Image (cartoon, rainbow, N blue to C red):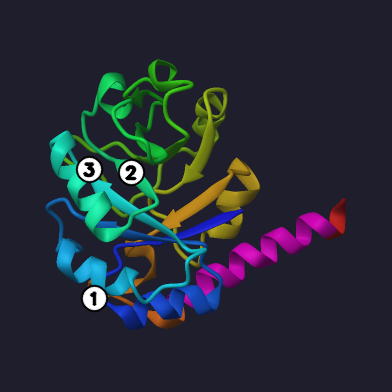
Amino acid sequence: MLIKICGIKDINTAHTAIDAGADALGFVFAPSSRRITPEDARKIIQNLPRDILRVGVFVNASISSVKEIAEYCDLTTLQFHGKESVDYCQQFKRPVVKAIKVAKDGRLFPDPVRYKGVVKMFLTDTYQPGTDGGTGKTFPWKEVATIKGYGLVILAGGLNPNNIFQALSVVRPWGVDVSSGVETRGRKDSKKIKKFIQEVRRWKNEQNITR
């Protein structure tokens, strides 16, 4: 179960997440309250253990810009939340995660079937017109079953320490991703990060016990 804490902006939060058990950290390079400059991201990444996945989050950025930032910051993985086409996703040597937005009625934006075999993982998020993600709202988790047929799924969208156990029980994803759900007044909260990861571990332990 991959655990990713997204929207990292400082080294203290990065180390808090890692010490609590996070496997991956997300750095947002798109317009957002969690946006970080490549320079600041690089400084943080240079002080991280090498086995931690460093994920760059982009929205409709130029291919050249993504490649430049990925190389400069030493990113391991690229996550795309915009209207990036299949051809676009094929332009990178690093593993690609494509965000799929799920509407309340189960519609998927974009259709994941187009990206099957092209991207390494799909990240689910909540569909909300006019936004590119990070809504902090959930969607009907049962709809993720459709996406699983096309690749590995990282569950995101409105997750927090209070609902992650239930979400995992419904979806059983390959990984989970959280950002606003471990924040207080727009800033990462160390207690919430630790609690979130504890709940993921509790769920994993229960699965092992019942087998």
- What is the CA distance from the residue labelled 2 to the residue labelled 1? 25 Å
Q: Is residue 198 above or below residue 52?
A: below
Query: Is 156 above or below relative to 36?
Result: above
Q: Secondary structure at mark 2?
A: strand
The image position of residue 77, as x and y in percent, is 38, 47
Q: In the rendered structure, are the residues bearing label 3 and label 2 in contact, judged by CB atoms less than 8 Å apart?
A: no
The main secondary structure of the magenta stretch is helix
Type of residue at label 2?
Gln
Identify the secondary structure beneath mark 1. loop
Q: Amino acid at mark 3?
A: Lys
Q: Which stretch appears magenta?
A: 192-208
Image point 33% across, 25% down: which residue? Answer: 90
N-terminal-most mark, 3 or 1 = 3
The residue under the point 15% across, 56% down is 32
Q: Is residue 28 above or below residue 45?
A: above
Badge 1 is on which residue? 185
